[in-house]
Image (tube, helix red, strand yellow):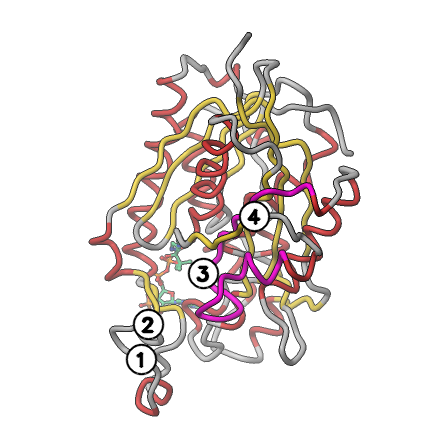
C-alpha cells in the first residue's frame, strides 16, 4: 500500500461585490493609478460592505459553495481550520463561527494566525491530521476582511489590501497525488516591520490607541519587500531542489499576491515562464489569507491530475514557506 497523503479534492472562493478601484482611491488619499499599478500591479480590490459583516460571512460563502460542488454533507466534516488575521472577534475562533453558519456540527475547529503565510501553514497542519489516518475530511479556509484593519488615510497601506476568502476540502489519497512536501519558516524579529500595534494584551484598546490609529496594519513597506523578495524566492527554490524538480517539471506556481514585483522575482529565480504563474493581484490586491485559495479557485478549470504545483508565501511575523503538491483531479468540479 502506498503512503497516505492529503489531497485537495475541491476548492471554492468568494469575493464581495463592491469594487474599490485605483481611481476611487485617488479621491481618498494622495495617490495615482499609475503609482499603484507600477509599484504593485494592483488595479482594483473587492471590499466587504455592510454593518456587522465579518470574515466569516465571506468564508461561509466559500465553504457552502465547496460543500455543494463536492457533494459533501456538512455533518461529515471532522475539522475546520481557518487562517485569518482579521477574525470576526478576538475569540471565539472564526472557524467556530464558520462551522456554525455552515451547519458543520461534528467537527472541531480552530483559527491559525501566520499572517499572509496562514493558508500554507493551515494546509500543512491539516495534511498531518490526514496523513495520521485519524481524519478523512478537513476544511482549510483562508480569508480576510482586510478593509476592517486598513487605515484609509494611510496611502502606503490602503492601496494594497482587499477582502476575499477561499476554502479547500482535504481528503486522503493513496494514488501518489496530494501534498508531497512543505518548508515553513518563522522569524519573529521581523515583527517590528509589520504588525498591528494595539488591540492585543500588550496594548489593549483605549481612547489613546484609537486616537493614534493603532488598530490598523502598520507596515514598513520597503523593509518587508526586501525580506519578502529574497525569502519567498529562496524557499521556493529550496523546495524544488529538495524534491529534484526542475522548472520543466512544475506546472504552476501559486504565489501569495502581495506585489507583482515579488511574484515576478520568485518566478524568475525558479526559472518559470509567466504562463505558469497564477496572478490575479490586479483584480483583488493582497487579500492576505485569501490569495492562494482564490488563485487555485480561479485556475481550477485548467488544472490536471498529477500537475506539480508549488504554493509560496511570505507575510507578517515574519512567516514564509512553500508547499509542493500534486493536483488530484482534472478540471473544475
Ligand atoms: O503580504 C504581506 C507582506 N507584505 C509585502 O510583501 C509588501 C512588501 N512591500 C511592498 O510591496 C512595497 O514596499 C509597497 C508597495 C508597500 C511600497 O512600494 P515601494 O516601491 O517600496 O515604495 P516606497 O515605500 O519606497 O515609497 C516610494 C515613494 C515614497 O515617496 P518618496 O519618499 O520617494 O518621496 C512614498 O512616500 O512612494 C511614495 N508612496 C506613494 N506614492 C503614491 C508610498 N505610497 C504611495 C502611494 N501613492 N500609494
Ligand 1 shows up in the quarter that is bottom left
The residue that label 2 is drawn on is 200
Badge 4 element: strand
Report the mark closest to the observer, 2 or 4.
4
From this viewpoint, which residue is outermost toward the left?
A: 189
Asked if the residue under mark 1 is in contact with the one under mark 2, i.e. CB atoms within 8 Å, the reply is yes
Q: In the image, is residue 65 part of the stretch drawn in magenta?
A: no
Depth check: 42 or 172 in front? 172
Report the mark closest to the observer, 3 or 1.
1
Badge 3 element: loop
The residue that label 4 is drawn on is 80
Between discs 4 and 3, the one toward the N terminus: 4
The residue that label 1 is drawn on is 204
The residue that label 3 is drawn on is 85
Q: CA distance from mark 3 to mark 1?
A: 17 Å
Q: CA distance from mark 2 to mark 3?
A: 12 Å
Disc 1: CA contacts within 10 A as few (<14), some (14-19) or many (>=20): few
From this viewpoint, which residue is outermost toward the bottom?
A: 207
Amino acid at each position: 500500500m502506498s503512503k497516505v497523503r492529503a489531497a485537495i479534492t475541491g476548492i471554492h472562493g468568494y469575493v464581495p461585490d463592491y469594487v474599490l478601484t485605483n481611481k476611487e482611491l485617488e479621491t481618498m488619499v494622495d495617490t495615482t493609478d499609475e503609482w499603484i499599478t507600477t509599484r504593485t500591479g494592483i488595479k482594483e480590490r473587492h471590499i466587504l460592505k455592510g454593518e456587522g459583516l465579518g470574515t466569516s460571512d465571506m468564508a461561509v460563502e466559500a465553504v457552502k459553495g465547496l460543500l455543494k460542488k463536492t457533494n459533501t454533507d456538512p455533518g461529515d466534516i471532522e475539522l475546520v481550520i481557518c487562517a485569518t488575521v482579521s477574525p470576526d472577534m478576538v475569540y471565539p475562533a472564526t472557524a467556530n463561527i464558520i462551522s456554525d453558519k455552515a451547519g458543520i456540527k461534528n467537527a472541531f475547529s480552530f483559527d491559525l494566525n501566520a499572517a499572509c503565510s496562514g493558508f500554507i501553514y493551515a494546509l500543512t497542519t491539516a495534511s498531518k491530521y490526514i496523513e495520521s489516518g485519524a481524519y478523512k475530511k478537513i476544511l482549510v479556509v483562508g480569508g480576510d476582511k482586510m478593509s476592517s484593519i486598513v487605515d484609509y488615510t494611510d496611502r502606503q497601506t490602503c492601496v494594497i489590501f482587499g477582502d476575499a476568502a477561499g476554502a479547500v476540502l482535504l481528503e486522503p489519497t493513496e494514488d501518489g497525488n496530494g501534498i508531497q512536501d512543505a518548508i515553513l519558516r518563522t522569524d519573529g524579529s521581523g515583527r517590528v516591520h509589520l504588525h498591528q500595534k494595539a488591540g492585543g494584551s500588550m496594548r489593549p484598546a483605549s481612547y489613546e490607541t484609537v486616537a493614534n490609529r493603532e488598530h490598523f496594519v502598520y507596515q514598513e513597506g520597503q523593509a518587508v519587500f526586501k525580506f519578502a523578495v529574497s525569502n519567498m524566492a529562496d524557499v521556493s527554490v529550496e523546495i524544488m531542489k529538495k524534491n529534484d524538480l526542475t522548472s520543466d517539471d512544475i506546472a504552476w506556481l501559486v504565489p501569495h499576491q502581495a506585489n507583482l514585483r515579488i511574484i515576478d522575482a520568485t518566478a524568475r529565480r525558479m526559472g518559470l515562464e509567466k504562463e505558469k504563474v497564477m496572478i490575479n493581484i490586479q483584480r483583488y490586491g493582497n487579500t492576505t489569507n485569501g490569495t492562494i485559495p482564490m488563485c487555485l479557485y480561479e485556475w481550477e478549470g485548467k488544472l490536471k491530475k498529477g500537475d506539480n504545483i508549488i504554493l509560496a508565501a511570505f507575510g507578517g511575523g515574519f512567516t514564509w514557506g512553500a508547499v509542493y503538491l500534486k493536483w488530484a483531479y482534472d478540471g473544475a468540479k
